[in-house]
Image (tube, rainbow, N blue to C red):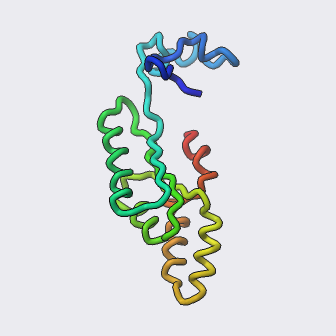
Amino acid sequence: MAFWKEKDGCLYDDEELNRDNIFINDDVCKMAALRKKNGGKPILHASVSAKWTMRSDRAQNSRTEALNLIRNRKGHLPHIVVVTGEPLPSRLASLALGTGDLDCVYHFALYELMEAVQEYGSHGREDIVETLENLVEGKRLKDISDLPLDLSV
């Protein structure tokens, strides 16, 4: 649910937020910044950068986009994530480990990639298997199916 109107950037009134269910009234959320009656402003909950594949310049571009949004934000620090289909573990590592600016990298076919890398790694390329395993175990790389729940907090 969007908490601001696309056409003018204004927040919804309480009546609009409570259209389907009662979420907000004068007994709860009294000082919430999202409420129009409290003078709230739209928030930036997440910066999601989508890149089909990664080159070093695209990786830097994702960071720069997110950092510019952060500098201009009001309120809490947003989630900063990248969604990609990059097949090379080394490029994924450069983005996921990077400078720590990103919360996580999400791959649209992580389980299939892991299977392919396992198969390829069995032909003398254990290093790429290890790289991918480290990213996944370190929670720096996740499947796209994890994104909605990760952003819900």
Q: In this view, does 116 lie to the left or right of 72?
A: right
Q: Which residue is drawn at 29% across and 38% down?
A: 71
Q: Where is residue 102 in the image (x, y as percent from the top left)?
A: 41, 52
Above or below, comparing residue 68 to residue 109 in the picture: above
**Quick one: 127 or 57, which is closer to the camera?**
57
Q: Residue at x 66, y 15 (%)?
A: 19
Give residue 39's quadrant in the image: top left
Q: Quadrant of the C terminus?
A: top right
Q: Is residue 151 left or right of residue 92?
A: right
Give residue 77's quadrant in the image: top left
Q: In this view, does 19 lie to the left or right of 11?
A: right
Q: Where is residue 26 in the image (x, y as percent from the top left)?
A: 56, 10
Above or below, comparing residue 132 to residue 150 in the picture: below
Q: Which residue is drawn at 50% across and 63% down?
A: 86
Q: Position of residue 44 (x, y in %)?
A: 43, 33
**Quick one: 16 or 119, which is closer to the camera?**
119
Above or below, comparing residue 61 to residue 56 in the picture: above
Q: Residue at x 35, y 29 (%)?
A: 74
Q: Where is residue 143 in the image (x, y as percent from the top left)?
A: 60, 57
Give residue 110's quadrant in the image: bottom right
Q: In which quarter of the image is the N terminus?
A: top right
